[in-house]
Structures are given as C-alpha cells and as structure tokens.
Amino acid sequence: MKTPKASRPSALSRNRLKFIRLAEKRINKVAKQLQLIGNLSNKTNYAYADDEVEKMFTYIDSCVQSARERFKSTGAGPETVFTLED
C-alpha cells in the first residue's frame, strides 16, 4: 500500500535530513582525526621538524579552504593524498 502524498517527506526534507546526518558524522570524524594529529606533538614519543609541522598544517588549511569554496561554487580541490616526502 502506498503512503499518501501528504504524509511522505518531501525530497527537500529528505535531502536536508541526509545532509545533517552526514555532516554531523563527517565533522565528528574530522575532529577526532585532528585530535589524533595533535597527539603527534608529544616529543617523548615522536621526532619531527618545525618545517614538517608547518607543511602538515598548510596542507590541512588548503583542504579546509577547498571544502569551503565548494560550498560557494564548483571547483577542483588540492591533491587528495598528503606526504611529507617531496
């Protein structure tokens, strides 16, 4: 039996709910990964150079900027794989 049209969620509300569900999930995942990156600052367990840290955060900043721009328009983003090697 089909649901009457009046009680079906509109495509707009389904898309909105999907956006909210995925945005919350993905933002929480990014936040957790950033916390883990912060753990790398423990000099007792890790050795790193200041220029490596700068390179990491420059790349992260460019990824954030690219994602922000995609909400304003369409465009290509930065490289999708990060490496400290040149």
Image (cartoon, rainbow, N blue to C red):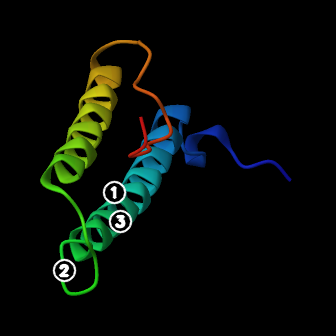
* Badge 2 density bin: few <14, some 14–19, many ≥20, Cα 10 Å: few
Above or below residue 69? Residue 17 is below
Q: Which mark is residue 27?
A: 1
**Location of residue 60 in the rendering, given as x and y in whole percent from the top left corner:** 27, 43
Q: Is residue 74 left or right of residue 37?
A: right
Residue type of the residue flagged with mark 2: Asn
Residue at 41 percent across and 12 percent down: it is: 75
Above or below residue 33? Residue 66 is above
Residue, disc 2? 42
Q: Is residue 17 left or right of residue 68?
A: right
Residue at 19 percent across and 80 percent down: it is: 42
Q: Is residue 32 left or right of residue 22?
A: left
How far apart in space, not on screen, are marks 2 and 1 (Cα)? Answer: 24 Å
Q: 68 or 47, which lies in front?
A: 47
Residue type of the residue flagged with mark 3: Gln
**Is label 2 in a helix, a strand or a loop?**
loop
How far apart in space, not on screen, are marks 2 and 3 (Cα)? Answer: 16 Å
**Location of residue 17 in the rendering, given as x and y in whole percent from the top left corner:** 45, 50
Residue, disc 3? 33
State which tag comes first along the sequence, 3 or 1. Answer: 1
**Is label 1 in a helix, a strand or a loop?**
helix
State which tag comes first along the sequence, 2 or 1. Answer: 1
Seen from this angle, which residue lies furthest right? 1
Nearer the viewer's eye, disc 2 or disc 3?
A: 2
State which tag comes first along the sequence, 2 or 3. Answer: 3
**Location of residue 41 in the rendering, given as x and y in whole percent from the top left corner:** 18, 72
